[in-house]
Image (cartoon, rainbow, N blue to C red):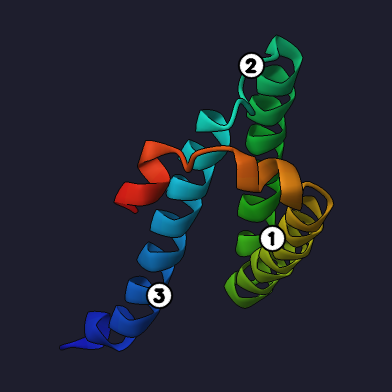
Amino acid sequence: LGWWRRSAEIKRVHFAEEWNEFHHLLIMEALGGDQKWSDRFFAQHAAVFYYWILVSMWLLSPSIAYNFSQLIEAHAVDTYGEFRDANEELLKQLPPPRIALQY
């Protein structure tokens, strides 16, 4: 008994990561990242493809799937940092999206 409690910390961290990703997407949409149909189409289909890749990896090894997901997130952090640096002046001129202030 109690085996489900062993993963409580992992679940807490995963929920925090998911909540952060959710708000990141809302902020990017508020900045106009969902305006082009082609961007939405690519993002939705890439998400489905990514999901099935992770499911396949998880079937082989849950830890490999989680580590792969962490690598993707680390790459995303680098990419967003480059975007921020390249557009720093423009972003300073824009008011923060309402969702960013609430988050």
Labels 2 and 1: the sequence-earlier one: 2
Of tags 3 and 1, the one toward the viewer is 3
x, y percentage for residue 86? 84, 51
Mark 1 surroundings: few (<14), some (14-19) or many (≥20) residues within 10 A: some
Q: Amino acid at mark 1?
A: Met
Tell me, for residue 20, which label it has, or none. none
Labels 2 and 3: the sequence-earlier one: 3
Quadrant of the frame with the N terminus: bottom left
Q: Residue at x 61, y 52 (%)?
A: 55
100 displayed left or right of 36: left
Q: Amino acid at mark 3?
A: Val
Q: Residue at x 73, y 61 (%)?
A: 72
Q: Are marks 2 and 1 in contact (CB under 8 Å)?
A: no
Give the Cα separation between the discs numbered 2 and 1. 33 Å
- Inspect this view and state whether residue 50 appears: yes
101 displayed left or right of 88: left
x, y percentage for residue 81? 74, 61
Give the Cα separation between the discs numbered 3 and 1. 20 Å
SS for tag 2? Answer: loop
SS for tag 3? Answer: helix
Tell me, for residue 13, which label it has, or none. 3
SS for tag 1? Answer: helix
Q: Amino acid at mark 2?
A: Gln
Give the quarter of the image for residue 78: bottom right
Q: Which residue is mark 1?
A: 57
Q: Residue at x 50, y 40 (%)?
A: 27
Give the Cα separation between the discs numbered 2 and 3. 32 Å
- Inspect this view and state whether residue 60 appears: no
Q: Residue at x 72, y 41 (%)?
A: 90
Q: Which residue is mark 2?
A: 35
